[in-house]
């Protein structure tokens, strides 16, 4: 069954939930206040399946938290639930909760995200399957938060016996970035002086490229010309591209245009951002095992189950 049904109010949302309707359907419900959010969470917790997307536009004291909640078959034919907090503003609020209420350190969060990003790379490109000459990874870093995560990712890839190189054209003066740069240098991770403009040279030299240039809320104009030119080069690559958190240049809410980066792998940090629903690559991981359960409940997150001691899960 396909089509769109306009539902009105909590009563009809409750009715749709209780029927457990399946099928390729989009349900749109306009609900008001906290009652609608309660019903949405209840429906979510039931784990309803099917090729369905449920969009709830809410108003009231917690209305923004309900916008854009989606159920649907998006990746590999499997049901994918994006969290209810994928916007830039709410992702920032989640980070502040970790920093201020739970006393996570900024470097600690960067370390957790960078390590998990490196682990995601090993899941898609396991070292035993790669010939010696195929262990090379180019990590392209920007001067903001995502760049710091990229530096940590490169260091962990080196520890995992890959052969990373870093292109970091606009270096941050922030102490954390300087410390992470020093760590990479001490571990013999080479930094490129320039990025070859001949794309075929990059394709021949590296098995994959990690995009850690821009993160949510960071505009291309903020990071300068060298990063702009680097992104233009990344768009032309034929080797696999792994983007951290969001593909660089994408709007964290709406995604990217036709000429935007189209990575093969996306590693969402803490939780997928709203733009992740437009990702069409082969592998989508979420690295959010470090998020406390109380924070997940507060922000109505539904993160995937993590196998064993894994710090990433594939959606």
Image (cartoon, rainbow, N blue to C red):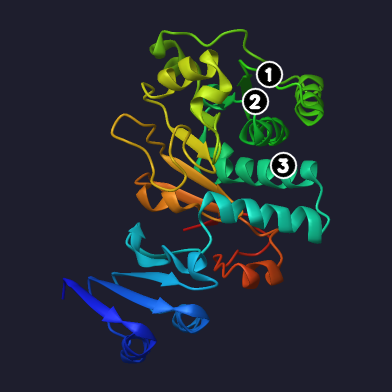
The front one of 51 and 248 is 248
Name which quarter of the figure residue 166 lies in: top right
Query: Mark 2 = which residue?
Result: 143
Residue displayed at 79% across by 41% down:
107
Q: Are marks 1 and 2 in contact (CB under 8 Å)?
A: yes
Q: Are marks 3 and 1 in contact (CB under 8 Å)?
A: no
Is residue 311 in view? no
CA gap, disc 1 and disc 2: 5 Å
Q: Position of residue 293 (x, y in %)?
A: 69, 70
Q: Nearer the viewer, mark 3 or mark 1?
A: 1
Instruction: State whether residue 254 is above or below residue 232.
Output: below
CA gap, disc 3 and disc 1: 17 Å
Residue displayed at 37% across by 44% down:
281
Query: Mark 1 = which residue?
Result: 171
Name which quarter of the figure residue 26 lies in: bottom left
Q: Earlier in the sequence, mark 3 or mark 2?
A: 3
Q: Which disc is residue 237 wearing?
A: none
The front one of 52 and 250 is 250
Q: Position of residue 41 (x, y in %)?
A: 50, 79
Query: Mark 3 = which residue?
Result: 110
Q: Relative to residue 149, is residue 262 drawn left or right?
A: left
Instruction: State whether residue 30 is above or below residue 135.
Output: below
């Amino acid at each position: 069954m396909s089509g769109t049904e306009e539902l009105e109010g909590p009563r009809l949302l409750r009715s749709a939930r209780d029927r457990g309707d399946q099928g390729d359907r989009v349900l749109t419900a306009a609900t008001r206040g906290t009652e609608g959010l309660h019903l949405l969470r209840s429906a979510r917790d039931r784990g309803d399946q099917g090729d369905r997307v449920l969009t709830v536009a809410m108003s009231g004291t917690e209305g923004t938290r309900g916008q854009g909640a989606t159920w649907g078959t998006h990746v590999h034919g499997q049901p994918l639930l994006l969290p209810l907090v994928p916007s830039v503003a709410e992702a920032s609020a989640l980070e502040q909760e970790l920093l201020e209420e739970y006393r996570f350190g900024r470097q600690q969060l960067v370390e957790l995200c960078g390590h998990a990003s490196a682990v995601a790379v090993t899941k898609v490109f396991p070292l035993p399957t790669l010939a010696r000459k195929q262990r090379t990874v180019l990590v392209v870093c920007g001067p903001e938060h995502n760049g710091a995560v990229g530096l940590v990712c490169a260091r962990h890839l080196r520890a995992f016996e890959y052969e990373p190189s870093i292109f970091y054209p606009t270096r941050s003066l922030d102490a954390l970035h300087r410390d992470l740069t020093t760590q990479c240098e001490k571990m013999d991770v080479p930094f490129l002086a320039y990025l070859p403009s001949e794309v075929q040279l990059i394709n021949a030299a590296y098995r994959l490229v990690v995009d850690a240039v821009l993160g949510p809320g960071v505009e291309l104009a903020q990071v300068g010309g060298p990063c702009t030119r680097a992104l233009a080069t990344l768009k032309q690559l034929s080797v696999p591209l792994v983007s951290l958190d969001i593909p660089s240049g994408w709007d964290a809410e709406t995604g990217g245009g036709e000429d935007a980066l189209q990575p093969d792998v996306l590693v969402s940090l803490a939780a997928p951002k709203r733009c992740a629903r437009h990702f069409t690559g082969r592998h989508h991981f979420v690295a959010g095992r470090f998020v406390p359960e109380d924070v997940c409940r507060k922000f109505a997150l539904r993160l995937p189950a993590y196998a064993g001691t894994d710090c990433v899960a594939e959606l």
